[in-house]
Image (cartoon, rainbow, N blue to C red):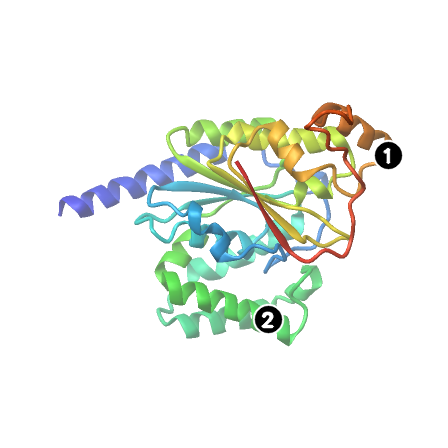
Amino acid sequence: MQSKLQTTDQIEENQKKRVQLLSKVKQLPTQELNECFAFWLGNDPIKEKDLEPYKTDKPFVFVGTSIFGAIALACDLGEKVNSVPQVIIVDLSPQVADCWTLIKTYFASDSETNPTSFVDGFIDFLKKKNINQFSMDIYDDESFQQLHDLLMNLMKKYGLTRVKEMINDAIILKQSWAHKETFQQIREVYADTNIYAYPSNIIHSIRDLKTQKDVAQCIEILRPVLSIQTNLDNGEPTKSHLIENNTVLSIMRALGPGIFVNDEERVQFNNEFYTTDPSSFFYQPAKKQETGHSPQLSAQN
């Protein structure tokens, strides 16, 4: 009975924090969002074994982007945690927001307890909604099958109830990863909780150095125990960065300027984040991103 009461108290506290955060954060109207098709599956080269050293048995908040790629990472990191991690999605794409509305509609209303029947019904539901019209990676029978397999694997490992709870309780914030107030509010509401950050390849997708640094600062504001970031190489992520020391300096040095900043800002990046004295032991100029690399993993302390 005591354990049950504690569980009920924790559920109420978690709901209180969700309401508190949603009341604080300014959600952007649709016209201020950036049109970008949704990645349901994600394409970051991150394997579960890469995350093994960072798995925890303590409750945490997972601040990520996009859709089921974030859910899968939160599930993997939290497999040792009794409580369900709180997922917060920060995304500027109206398509991502619309996808989450569809997902939550189905997950909250379907009472099926058999995982296979539940996922089969979900896939049929999505097909009827023509999600291929605003999805980057779900567009044919094969990709629908990949989504089916992803969800079945998650439910086999973590259980239908846990996955449903994580998705139903996910907070969707229509905001930019460069909006400092949003990340200050997340940190304030969850001041006593560890945070994992998953900005994916957002920094490398940005074309100006100032906004890149703004995103890095927002990550720093979260004070995450780990940020999971990736590069962009010829439009595709090929390298993962698992960063523990999340200062602007360490993030920018780990990632480099990416492929989209112009030559002038590349020089500015060199001057700000790397020494420009070739005789220095720490000399590391920011070169233009090379293409054609196979997936790599980099752990940054």
Q: Is residue 262 left or right of residue 86?
A: right
Q: Which mark is residue 158?
A: none
**Which of 162/48 is in front?**
48
Question: Horizontal placement of 15 versus 68: left or right?
Answer: left
In the rendered image, the vertical position of residue 5 relative to residue 247, given as above or below = below
User: Residue 30 in the image: x percent, y percent?
Assistant: 68, 43
- In x, y percent, where is residue 148? 52, 70
Viewer-nearest residue: 292 or 193: 292
Q: Position of residue 78 (x, y in %)?
A: 39, 50
Callout 1 amino acid: Asp
Answer whether residue 229 is visible to the viewer in this image. Answer: yes
Q: Residue at x 43, y 47 (%)?
A: 53
Q: Give the crowd class for mark 2: few <14, some 14-19, many >=20 residues within 10 Å.
A: many
Residue corresponding to mark 1: 263
* Earlier-in-chain disc, 2 versus 1: 2
Left or right: where does residue 16 sit relative to residue 88?
A: left
Does residue 33 appear in this view?
no
- Frontmost of labels 2 and 1 is 1
**Where residue 52 sits: x, y (%)?**
43, 51
Name which residue lies at 67% across and 73% down.
140
Q: Quadrant of residue 281?
A: top right
| Mark 1, secondary structure of its residue | helix
Q: Secondary structure at mark 2?
A: helix
Residue bearing the label numbered 2: 144
Residue 10 picture quarter: top left
- Under mark 2, the amino acid is Phe
Q: Label 2 to label 1, Cα distance in Å?
A: 41 Å
Looking at the image, which residue sits at the far left?
1
Work out whether 274 lies above or below 262.
above
